[in-house]
Amino acid sequence: MRATFACVQVLGAISALNAEVLRGGPETDFLHRLAATLQAQAKCDAVLVHVAHGDVVALATVGQETANRTQSSDLASIGQFTPSPGGSLLPEAGLRLVGGNGALFTDVRQLPGVPPIVREHLARLEVGCGFAVPLVQDGEFLGHVVFAWRTPRSLSKGARRVLHKLARCAAINVQLYRVQQDRERDPLTGLFNRLGLERRWQECSASPRGALLFADLDGFKALNDVRGHLEGDRFLRELAEVLRVAAPAGTVISRYGGDEFVLLIPGAGRAEALQVRAAIMECVRAHVTAMEPPQPAIAIGISLWPHDGRSLQALIGKADQRMYQHKRRQVAQALTSRGQAQGRLPGGFFEGWLVNSPDSIIITDPDMKILYVNPAYERRAGYPLRELVGKRPNFIASGRTPREVYDDMWRALHTEGAWKGHVINRHRDDGDWIASVAITKIVDRRGRLVGYLGISRDVTTDVGEGRHALPPVYEGAFTQEALAFALAAAAEMHDQGSRAHLERIREFTRILVKAASPIYPELQSPVLLGTMALASVLHDIGKIAVPTHVLAKPGPLTEAEFELVKSHTIKGWELLQSPSLRDNRLPSPSHFLRVAANIARSHHERWDGTGYPDGLAGEEIPLEARIVAIADVYDALRSERPYKPGWSHQQAVEQIRSGRGRAFDPALVEVFLQVADSFAKVWDRMNDVYEAATGG
């Protein structure tokens, strides 16, 4: 009977403890609930839970009179602390002290290393006798749980066995809790990530008022470029510690993006938020003073709830908007105020020049995030200012500008503060344009970099008519593009296809790469954008090796014929890996050819592993191939074939939607659904052009 009762007791404990893990929340809250659950299951007078995690020790105690509280003031006063050397409660050496089977103490207040505040708390609970059990899971020491009573007692073997099982359940749940918490933490800084921020917002939003601070590092890109990413990572870790020190107790601090941070301060009003912003900016300023240039700075925008909204995204959007307004004021002040760092202009004259200049003018912050573009730039790019703020100029990059141009641009801006050259940009709806660009840095009265000013002029017509020459670096890029299209067009003619199909695939790929860059940061390079877009036209190059009568067959293919068609993936990969296409000065194919070869081989693989030729699954499939797979399927579905009519846009979208997680990368399908209207516009525009050119 007793054994049955013990089993039921332990099963009840497991269920209760699992529920605590699912509730999540701050670690001190979790440990308090864990202690309360253990106390209820063990039916003892008090429970003390001690967990060591890195350099921080978390303690929670609960007695009968506090077991039903969600959080006690006593617990809050104990919470977490960083122990002095050798001062933690029952450190790992305590495994030997307590023993693997636990140990019974006549007075738990005399346990080694118990902090005075915990002793006082145990005294208030009037407990003496205690049974201490180490928390160990998969060989890892996690801490201890101490079951305590007010009156002395001896424990039977059965009672000890039950307490051991409770401790084992507690250890499992502590580890599960940590795994869950790791999902909500940024591994570099230890701050909350976006998921953790959203979870904490659910708690903070219960406060009738509060403040959100959106912080962005200025000059962080320069720090990475000049000193390397390891130094950049170190700075981010230091900044996280600065934020922890400067922010008031109870603040939720998260790393929202690469160099962006969000702070939630429940209960704060505007005055308190301004004080916190000033404290953070002063701490950051003091921290970077001892650094060699470049010295990052921090810009912070504030929003308040409920005044600016009740949703997290609305508050972030408002704070972000105010942060960029602050940056624009800094730049305007630097350009129009008097000072010795550089010449200034009268405010009215400067504003009139921006608005009325026929040249395209762009102003960015030190990390090249757009703060302002003038009306001429809006017309030339096809985007209004509100859609460009916060993005980088490469948002409108065509991908056809050689990498060497960008390398030279950044070198000159970092070393000389100015650059002149040419880039090829893309209008939202009207093709590419060649811009002659001049960029100069903007510094304030103290000589601190606050942004860049760029002036560009469209020279597309002049280049086409021979009145304006491009640098030699563009010759190689244009030659590569011409050869790629010639090779791809030969394969399309063999398959009775058209150049319009290639142009559409290129545009579809460009749209997906640009839209997917927030979730796949490696896609943010304007050079990679151009490489993938151009390489996509070679996706079916291997069809040159497939007999025409098989490709043009109007009826179902035999098994042998289908195997021939499937072989175009391998044939294309072999062709693009061929030494005949390789620069003899290089030991391996160029980056462009590697990307093209990956696309040719793997664009018929499926997310669930049922594709060909290699049966790759999930992220084993190269990202460039996963992108082109969606572009190719959309175009194939819309196109008329000997064996089927063309599908409508909506039918094609629904087919791709239904393949999410089976045929296609689910994250990329979500991106596709967001930009599907752009696919439809490309299809309509390029079909019209092709039909007009062919008389169709």
Image (spheres, helix red, strand yellow):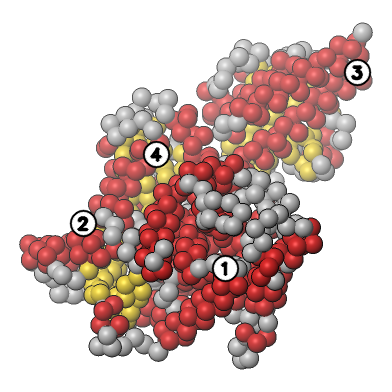
Q: What's the residue type where badge 3 is placed?
A: Gly
Q: Which mark is residue 158?
A: 3
* Point 53% across, 74% down: residue: 489
Check disc 4: other Cα within 10 Å, few if <14, some if 14-19, many if 20+. Answer: few
Check disc 3: other Cα within 10 Å, few if <14, some if 14-19, many if 20+. Answer: few
Q: What's the residue type where badge 1 is placed?
A: Gln
Residue 658, percent from left and from top: 59, 41
Q: Is residue 450 left or right of residue 163?
A: left
- Measured in 3D between alpha carbons, the distance from the residue under mark 1 to the one under mark 3, in whole angstroms, is 81 Å
Q: Which residue is mark 1?
A: 496
Q: What's the residue type where badge 4 is placed?
A: Gln
* Point 76% across, 33% down: residue: 172
Q: Of callouts 4 and 1, which one flags the residue occurring earlier in the amino acid sequence?
A: 4
Q: Of callouts 2 and 3, which one flags the residue occurring earlier in the amino acid sequence?
A: 3
- Measured in 3D between alpha carbons, the distance from the residue under mark 2 to the one under mark 3, in whole angstroms, is 73 Å
- Measured in 3D between alpha carbons, the distance from the residue under mark 4 to the one under mark 2, in whole angstroms, is 24 Å
- Of all residues shown, which one is farthest toward the top? 1
Quadrant in the picture for residue 495:
bottom right
SS state under label 1: loop
Q: In front of the other: label 1 or label 2?
A: 1
Check disc 1: other Cα within 10 Å, few if <14, some if 14-19, many if 20+. Answer: few
Q: Which mark is residue 518?
A: none
Badge 4 vs badge 2, beta-carbon distance below 8 Å: no
Q: Which residue is mark 4?
A: 313
